[in-house]
Image: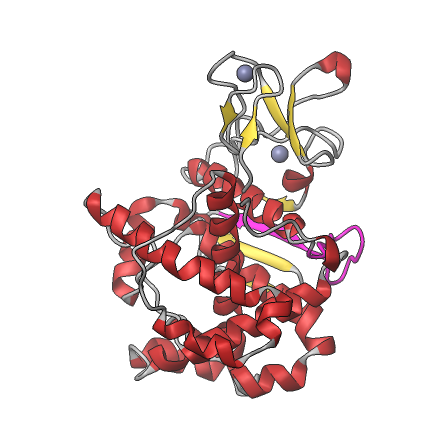
Amino acid sequence: VRAFTCPHCHALVAYENSLCLTCGSALGYLRSAGDFVVIDQRAGYRPCANLSKASCNWVAEVDSFCWSCALTRTRPADSDPLMPAFALAETAKRRLLFQLESLRLPVITRTDDPAHGLVFDMLSSSTGPVTTGHASGVITLDLAEGDDAHREGVRQSLGEPYRTVLGHLRHEIGHWYWDVLVLPNHLPTFRLLFGDERADYAQALSGHYGAGESAGWQVGHVSDYAAAHPWEDWAETFAHYLHIRDTLQTAAAYGMKIDGPNLPISSAAPLSAEPEDETSGFGEIIRTWLPMTYALNGVNRSMGKEDLYPFVLTPRVLSKLRFVHAVISEATISRNSLPPLTSH
Ligand SMILES: [Zn+2]
Ligand SMILES: [Zn+2]
Ligand SMILES: [Zn+2]
């Protein structure tokens, strides 16, 4: 996200905050302005009704709720043990929505399109089984994924290097964007890069979960799960592209610039063979991103933490990311007015 400041005292304000820690002003994120405002009933700025239940720091713009909370159709009862996870999931969702709008991607709600528009079911598996997934615009999240012990257990049992609630939301909305952007306009190129999505989906997934790690997935996929089916490959690659763009936006907002050490970027070498990368901006994204990941992994290790970025971008994965970039660039409402990638 961008770096925000308090409209009252101009101190730095984290995107998740509903209070300025410097001057004590109650703050809210006003989506229609893309910025924080001081909560002031006289000026018409009321906090979202989910301020306490969803840790929501957006201003109410749809009746008593904000636009983000209004996109959630189902949530657990107040007494549900997973209510803290609901707040965590909604916080991740607000970051997701900020990014979609920042990239100028279309967000079609259920009001605009009652059959395929976006809506979220945030469900608790404390009372019955819940499957995280996407179907015709409905994104379902098992809120147990917001419970650290549960999520870490699943991550270890599946041998995944990375598992977060934000990652789930980016993955599931990737399926929706496949329906909205790839299916109508880009199917032949998609099949060339990702394979034929008409392969039996249920069979592919049960095969994936039954067989353990797919042999050799690293060559052409950003994750093991991406190798399960072309649809999953797209969703994993799309989510990965959002990871890269958000992290670069944040780094730029703080003026982070990696100047050294001067390492050869071997996996990005094929970029030089793609002249369109320079006109589309993809080349700059990857050239900025790879040195950043080396630095951030080094920083994390200095703190005794695991790598921030436990991924490798092979030439085939880069081709898929380039395709995601092209699809998004074409879909953006105003493609020539994208914000600059870096602030320098
Ligand atoms: Zn302040
Ligand atoms: Zn809200
Ligand atoms: Zn999926």
Check the image and report above or below for 263 versus 296.
Answer: below
Residue 136 seen in render: no
Nearer to the camera, 35 or 266: 266
Report whether 325 appears left or right of 105: left
Residue 326 seen in render: yes
Residue 330: within the magenta?
A: no
Ligand 1's quadrant is top right
Residue 314: percent from the left, percent from the top?
39, 76
Q: Quadrant of residue 186?
A: bottom right
Q: Main secondary structure of the magenta part?
A: loop
Q: Residue at x 64, y 41 (%)?
A: 68
Nearer to the camera, 80 or 218: 218
Give the mark count.
0
Q: Residue at x 42, y 72 (%)?
A: 268
Residue 117: within the magenta?
A: yes
Q: Residue at x 36, y 68 (%)?
A: 265
Residue 311: percent from the left, percent from the top?
35, 65
Q: Quadrant of residue 225?
A: bottom left
Residue 215: percent from the left, percent from the top?
30, 84
Q: Residue at x 32, y 57 (%)?
A: 294
Residue 56: percent from the left, percent from the top?
56, 31
Report whether 44 appears left or right of 121: right
Report whether 62 appears left or right of 5: right
Q: Find the magenta span and give its range.
A: 105-123
Nearer to the camera, 332 or 344: 344
Check the image and report above or below for 99 versus 226.
Answer: above
Q: Residue furthest right?
A: 112
Q: Quadrant of the N terminus?
A: top right
Q: Quadrant of residue 85?
A: top left
